[in-house]
Amino acid sequence: MPDRLYEQVPFRHSELEHRYGSKIHILSNPYLLSQLAQLCAKETVQPALNRLVVDLYARLLEDVVNAEFPRVVRDIETRMIDVNPAGVFHGEVLDRTVRAVTVNIARAGAIPSQTVYDLLNVALDPRGVRQDHIIMSRMLGKNEEVVGAGIGGMKIGGDVDGAFLLFPDPMGATGSSLSQAIDTYRRNVPGQPRRIINMHLIVTPEYLRRMTADHPDVVVYAVRLDRGLSSPEVMATVPGARWDEERGLTDHQYIVPGGGGFGEIMNNAYV
């Protein structure tokens, strides 16, 4: 008789209370917040910087997979089966047959997406895992404010039908680039994804407003919410309670407190 202890494995991640809606998950994780603070610190440079990005995305993916991906109950013989018939693990494990597509939005998304891709190839059947690539850049107005995003090229390797479509992009600032990338998949790529999940290190209230308006079905995971340009009165409230008054972006659409331009610092390329 197998032990049924692991037939239903509960998982609940710790999240901040907020009023942004049920699709938004802002994690409350001291380890991730500590690593992210180090990543954003002024004195942090390569190679420590990219190593921190890899660590953060590996652990963020763990939360996403645990909460969102399907599981199946299996019987798996252990090495002890040769000496004892009870050497069988019985319980829930990830369904390795599920499809997943991770999208590298260059430049800042290259390392996060590669990290997610490599780990999903271990957790799932690699035949159902794919990485796509989109080259995007901000489009600036006459006062150097962000007015949109332009796609310079892309390599999309097939349909997304029934797949988890993941966008591991470090900074959710304005949401313009990511919203356009999602639109591109909806319009031009065959198939209906099982779920679209955005994975960020930092998000702003402005990003969350844009994403929930443009794509209300998209699930968002973030390590940290930055609304550092809000008034003290607003910052004393539960996030989202005074959403229209929350502000995390400068006039040039950089996040505060933030960590600078991640596409620049991750590549040591300041153009």
Image (spheres, grey):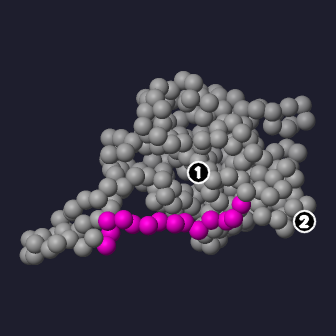
Q: Depth check: 5 or 226 in front?
A: 5
Range shown magenta: 5-18
Q: Do we see residue 260 in this rendering?
A: no
User: Quick one: label 1 or label 2, which is nearer the N terminus?
Assistant: 1
Q: Do we see residue 100 in this rendering?
A: yes
- Report whether 25 appears left or right of 141: left
Quadrant housing residue 141? top right
Other-residue count near label 2 (Cα within 10 Å), few / some / many at <14 / 14–19 / ≥20: few
Residue 143 at what x, y percent from top left? 91, 35
Residue found at x 51% / y 42%: 195
Residue found at x 69% / y 42%: 211
Identity, as a three-letter code, of the amino acid under mark 2: Pro
Find disc 1 in the rendering and name its residue.
199
Predominant SS of the magenta segment: loop
Identity, as a three-letter code, of the amino acid under mark 1: Met
- Report whether 239 appears left or right of 65: right
Other-residue count near label 1 (Cα within 10 Å), few / some / many at <14 / 14–19 / ≥20: many
Find disc 2 in the rendering and name its residue.
232
